[in-house]
Image (tube, grey):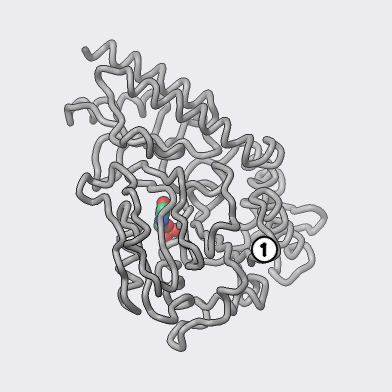
Amino acid sequence: MERVYNFSAGPSMLPVPVLEQAQKEMLCYGNTGMSVMEMSHRSKDYEDIIYGAEALLRELMGISDNYEVLFLQGGASTQFAAIPLNLFKNKKADYVITGQWAKKAAAEAARYGDVNIVASSADKTFTYIPKLDKSTFSKDADYFYITANNTIYGTRYTQFPDTGDIPLVADISSNIMSEVMDVNKFGILYAGAQKNVGPAGLTIVIIRKDLIGNALDICPNMLNYKTHADARSMFNTPPCYAIYISKLVFEWIKGMGGVSQLQKINEEKAGILYDFLDESKMFRGTVVKEDRSLMNVPFVTDDEELNAKFIKEAKENGFVNLKGHRTVGGMRASIYNAMPLEGVKKLVEFMKKFESENK
Ligand SMILES: *Cc1c(COP(=O)(O)O)cnc(C)c1O
């Protein structure tokens, strides 16, 4: 069986050279005589892996010493609770609702304090990023929360809100390292690894140091950022293998020329797909042009049966996981860093052929 073009939203495809390297090192890592999975996380060899991964991430994202980088577990969803539990003082936060992940994050925060919904795009099924009016921001919010890229609906912020002294917190699960971001604009950036970094099981939290150490009393130790910052992500056993693979991905990104270079490729990939959707008479994108994601591209035909036929035939031709999220329907192509330009070009060729055969 040949490898397919995998458009899964997550877990999603990894670069082939990373998988090959992992395969080479599967039975015996370096001169340890064992696989990374079998290694003590307290060993020197493993420390080189986890802190090597951290150093590469800092270099690739331009993360200054003002920030801690934490390698945690529990997925992005655990951060929905960790953020209010660590940042609440006035017990008030502003949230922008741009999809299900933001909604879930806001609902979790509302268990511990007041959540002010600054804006929402629910009125048009989250097909746009709402324009924000600074006068509606809470002056006494402990933080301001956004989902930077909306995996399910395919929107992204192209400009981030200016929240002044109030820490901006962003879920970047599906766009981390896909485009250059100025980390210094944020209080917290966090991401589940399984979309654009590595295997599921690792959650990356990038947090400004002054935001650590003020957790609520009820905050579980394991959710307290201080616990993990003090122990350099080794308070307990970290997701060792997922971190190892992520390090290989960071090395791959560096070899590709870094995040700015990947951004160029991602813009080209997304451009090819959106250009086709704009000219096609059968397929169309569902998101307003100015807020289109570079990573997740939802599209539809006007016929449910045709959608199903397309998904089925695409799969038979080696383009898999193109079915849209169960709450949205239609199709979605997730074209993360690891999706090669060629994969998008071939998908568009296939869509053109499908369109001409099904007029
Ligand atoms: C996938 C995703 C999540 C949920 O991630 P888990 O690691 O499964 O908890 C949260 N936010 C965004 C933007 C996502 O894409």
Q: Position of residue 196 (x, y in %)?
A: 52, 46
Residue at image coords 66%, 78%: 230
Left or right of 80? Residue 177 is right
Which quadrant of the picture is home to ligand 1? bottom left
Residue at image coords 57%, 76%: 212
Q: Position of residue 184 (x, y in %)?
A: 60, 58
Q: Position of residue 111 (x, y in %)?
A: 31, 77
Vertical arrangement, residue 358 with respect to residue 321, above or below: above
Vertical arrangement, residue 102 with respect to residue 323, above or below: below
Q: 14 or 166: nearer the eye?
A: 166
Q: 91 or 352: nearer the eye?
A: 91
Q: 336 or 94: nearer the eye?
A: 94
Establish whether ligand 1 lies closer than 8 Å to the Cβ of label 1: no
Residue at image coords 23%, 14%: 358
Residue at image coords 33%, 66%: 106
Left or right of 356? Residue 162 is right
Vertical arrangement, residue 278 with respect to residue 249, above or below: above
Amino acid under label 1?
A: Glu
Within 10 Å of the Cα at label 1, are there few (<14), some (14-19), or many (20+) other Cα atoms? few
Task: Return the residue found at the far bottom.
Answer: 217
Q: Position of residue 296 (x, y in %)?
A: 40, 39
Q: Quadrant of the C terminus?
A: top left
Mark 1 sits on what residue? 38
Name the image quarter holding residue 349.
top left
Mark 1, secondary structure of its residue: helix
